[in-house]
Image (tube, grey):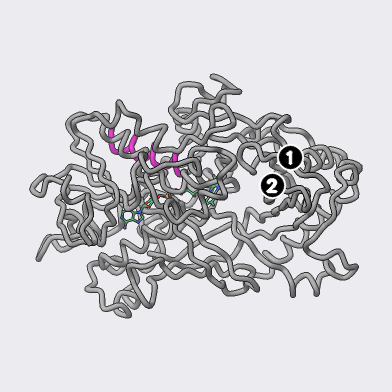
Amino acid sequence: MQSSCVLRIMDRTQYDTIIVGGGTSGSVLAARLSEDAHRNVLLIERGGDHSSYDDKVLKAERVWDAAASRRFSRTRRMRFRGNFLRNNITVGHTLGGTSAINAMAAVRGQPEDYDAWSELGCEGWSWQDVLPVFKKLENDLDFQDTKLHSSKGPLPLRRWRPAEFSLAQHALYQGVQEMGVKVCDDVNDRSKLPGVGVFPGTTRSGTERVTVSLAYLTPEVRQRANLTIVTDCPVGKVEFGKGPQAKRVIGVRTQDDRLILGKEVIVSCGALGSPQLLLLSGVGPQEELARHQIPPVHDLPGVGRNMQEHVGTCLIYRGPYEEEMIGSPAKILWADDYDGNGDINFHISAAPVRSGPIIGTISAVPVYHMLPTTRGAVTLNRKNPHGFPDCDLNFLTHPQDLAALQKIVARVLEWEQTRAFKDWGAIRLFPRPTPNTLKKVKWAKQIKTISYFHAVGTCAMGSVDDSQAVLDSQCRVHGIEGLRVVDASSMPRIIRGNTYLCCTMFAERVAEFMNK
Ligand SMILES: Cc1cc2nc3c(=O)[nH]c(=O)nc-3n(C[C@H](O)[C@H](O)[C@H](O)COP(=O)(O)OP(=O)(O)OC[C@H]3O[C@@H](n4cnc5c(N)ncnc54)[C@H](O)[C@@H]3O)c2cc1C
């Protein structure tokens, strides 16, 4: 394949830092690392540049079109173990990565999640360490310059207004309050949860999407002489030296076989793409490298393992009226605890899916278990190692996860009894409202799981004594010199929140380590 990228890369340049993957994390790294004028940075992205963005990316109400678009995303339909339905696994494929196709919900996760990382030996990642970084990245348009928020960062955050809610969202917001759940004006303030509130979205006006790359890779940043951005250029592998330098990175090789030299390589290809690139480069579990006849560079059993994702299921309703779609479908967040001990272990929201004069409005009410027990894995595609990787989320293979989902669905059934739900006038289409449908046995048989699109952990940070850890606390690959992995895959444990703000923070934090 002849890619346009090679024409723009100076073959003999040796970059100080090569970032592979210009997605959510990679965009932040490129902007922050190139602030040091003495560091020559190359960012390589497999998808297109900002110039390829169209309304699917730029208009907030078209988020599902962006996720379904072959131009901006890659999707594979897979059947997971423990699942009775095929699920889509989708990732972004453009500058901005998955931030260009996601639902824009900007949630940090709980302070306890980061303290748990720190307890696992990830130094510098406690809540106290990361809170200033969450503030640094945001321009919060609703809570400016408070203990928790800031208006000085690059990424605009705005909470959806009641006038922008759909009827299902109004019914959820009001109905849950009838059930005694507190209203929370800031879902990123732990002291106000459990509660029902409004997602912050990465938008200034509610009508447009701001991708992480638009926020960070501004025209001024792109003019820096020490930053080169190359798009439409898939990288095929990381290259290492020879003999005594066999575990020292020397650069990357593009899929069309050009070697680009770099002193340090940062892989930011996402929770699926990063383990894939490490495996293709000979870094990973030796039995898997052998299966694909990849010459081994370093045996690291944790690469591709420890995959974590919020498991969910979805109830579908039909409301009586046609409605206009305004902004992202992710607006209302009910973040609560099915056991009553104050933990945040579930998310429930309501999202319009389709509307028309005859059908009225079809809405999904997805429920998610935020503390899943099961772990999955990403492996190389058996037919084509460079193709979309194989993965198995192992959903519901642990009985605790099924029990948790049943309890969370029971909360939705309580909501169906509220005045606000009845005033909405909707009927449930799925699961069909027969008396037995939601009883334990039947439910277990017919549950159809969905993912929250929050896969993490496949190149996890952890101490060198942990055989499954791939990275140290500054995201350097154990046993290799000059290689880091910085993105959703680096998280040791999934957070109890949506993952994209966390990826942005993650990259900011590693840039701080590197710029010290
Ligand atoms: C449909 C959908 C909706 C979502 N909604 C939300 C939401 O509302 N809120 C939220 O918090 N999270 C959401 N998420 C999840 C969130 O967006 C991701 O967790 C996060 O953006 C991942 O960031 P990342 O940096 O790890 O990877 P990405 O942003 O995916 O970046 C990886 C980049 O690497 C590039 N790449 C991959 N392989 C190569 C290669 N070999 N060579 C060169 N480049 C390569 C890719 O093209 C991509 O640009 C959603 C996800 C999806 C799919």
Closest to the observer: 7 or 347?
Answer: 7
Residues in magenta? 503-516
Give the class, few, some or many, for how many residues have Cα within 10 Å of label 2's Cα (few <14, many ≥20). Answer: many
How far from the left and from the top, in percent, is residue 55? Answer: 49, 40
Q: Main secondary structure of the magenta part?
A: helix
Residue at left offset 47%, top offset 29%:
132
Residue drawn at the location 79% of the way across and 53% of the way down: 318
Name the residue carrying label 2. Answer: 351
Residue 118 shows in this picture = no
Tell me, for residue 449, which label it has, or none: none
Mark 1 Cβ inside 8 Å of ligand 1: no
**Foreground: 473 or 424?**
424
* Left or right of 397 on screen, residue 96: left
Taking depth in this image into account, of 318 and 226 the one nearest to the observer is 318
- Under circle 2, the secondary element is strand
63 lies left or right of 17: right
- Amino acid type shown at disc 1: Ser
What quarter of the picture does the C terminus occupy? Answer: top left
> Compared with residue 510, is residue 241 higher up or lower down, i.e. above or below?
below
Tell whether label 2 touches label 1 (CB within 8 Å).
yes
Q: Is residue 455 magenta?
A: no
- Label 1: which residue? 166
